[in-house]
Image (cartoon, rainbow, N blue to C red):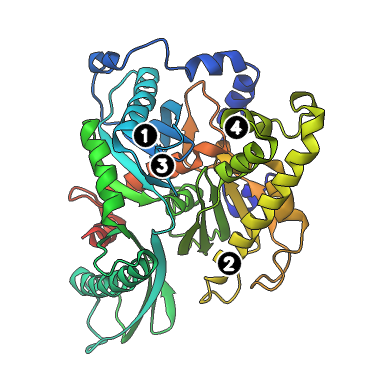
Amino acid sequence: MGFLDKFNIQTSKKSEKRDEEVSDQPEKQSELLSGDDFSVDDLYKLKSSDAILALDIGTEFVKAVIARQDSDKNLEVIGAGRVRQSEGNMYAGAIADIPSVVKVCEKAVAMAEKMAEVSSKTTVVGIAGELVKGNTSTVRYRRKNGNKPLTEQEIALIIKQVQEHAGTKARKEIADETNNPDAEVRLINSAIVSISIDGYKISNPVGFKGNDVVIQFYTAFAPLIHISAIEKVCAELNLDLLAVAVEPFAVCRACLGNDTDSNKFSGIVMDIGGGTTDIAVVDDGGVEGTRMFGVGGRSFTHQIAEILNVDFDTAEKYKISINNPAKVPADMRDAMMLSVQRNLAVWLSGVQITLEEFEDIEMLPNKILLCGGGAGLTELRDVLAGTDWFKGLAFSRRPVVHLIEAKEIPGIKNSTEVKLDSSYITALGLLRVALDTLIGSPDGAGVRGKLTKLLQN
């Protein structure tokens, strides 16, 4: 049984078989991931569709994934594209050069749409960076008349108050960190973590009676300048921006799957990208908070380039081949390993400091799920699994470390011939956020849709 199976995350046997077949055909994957055999103008020959586009604008790569919902309400991936970023395009996980990022995104979207044979405009984009603030707040609400059933309007009032309070807190934190008291922020994501009425935990408060309502909300805010850059990129690409999602929040949504109400998943999700490491803590299916710090895979590459006196691309090749002695010159290997160990110490300190910030959590989950391109560095996984870094933090025992694979994500199947590795997990999570947002649209049905709509207002 796989690690994630223990948390009610089921693996599709059909997807597993497909991935095994693709892994034996690396040449075909390379061909599919190459954008050299078509032009962006080919997009305009494709028919439009109601498919969803997830755009993960990372420091190292831009990944575009197109999916549609099948009859069982699962997501079917029908197109994927990945294009490497230039070094100056991003800074600390945020867009630094809009025109250059637009060009890279255009290529990635073109690759995905050519594979899917449809043109998708409905888009969800991920956002990361140290200035993205995600926190969980607890609101205690004493009702005047406990015999009257709770209404959507009453819940909407509570949500509005929480969002205003969280926005003030986020605005102050960002102002302090940027030394800009006029910093503008915008709400990115809101989600209900838990609800209880008169001490009883429930999944949906509408219609219940009671006097004391306690609701925990997750809210995430980001600087307006970062969000405006994403909006500009989408406008240049003629995409309809459905939502902007905090990336570790999106990864958590991928892990939770279709049924978020009954899922009891708990764990720490670490999305290790090129420029940042994004961390989210999930307890009983609720996101307790998200944090980021500015050390990712590129930091290791820069250290290798500096100590070996080679260019960035050569250093990146050495880093990827770190466990293959034949691809790293013997006279350079010891120095490279020393630089990696030094950077690991810095990265691990960032993890410790970040987890200390979750001070309202009595006990941290003892499961750590890794994803992102940087998580492919085996030394990074080894230092988490084999050292005593966790002592002094709120763990009951040594945490178990697992690298998430796309085939382990519930409710999503891959119908393409591209093997979706752990670096695609964020994009799959963005697809989930897209569905949540669409469910919360005016034509969304059911109680869950109504609650989601309240959170978006």
The mark nearer the N terminus, 2 or 3, is 3
Residue at disc 2, secondary structure: helix
Q: Position of residue 121 (x, y in %)?
A: 25, 32
Neighbour class for label 3 at 10 Å: few (<14), some, many (≥20)?
many
The residue indicated by pointer 3 is 90
Q: Position of residue 251 (x, y in %)?
A: 48, 49
Question: Which dot, 1 or 3, sits closer to the camera?
Answer: 3
Picture disc at residue 353: 2
Callouts 4 and 1 close, C-beta under 8 Å: no
Instruction: Report, in whole angstroms, how far the alpha carbon at label 1 lies from the one at label 3.
Output: 39 Å
Question: Which dot, 4 or 2, sits closer to the camera?
Answer: 2
Q: Is residue 194 visible?
A: no
> Measured along the vertical axis of the image, is residue 65 above or below residue 283?
above
The residue indicated by pointer 1 is 71
The mark nearer the N terminus, 3 or 4, is 4
The mark nearer the N terminus, 2 or 1, is 1
Instruction: Name the outermost residue toward the bottom.
Output: 144
The residue under the point 69% across, 61% down is 399
Residue at disc 4, secondary structure: helix
The residue under the point 46% across, 61% down is 290
The residue indicated by pointer 4 is 13
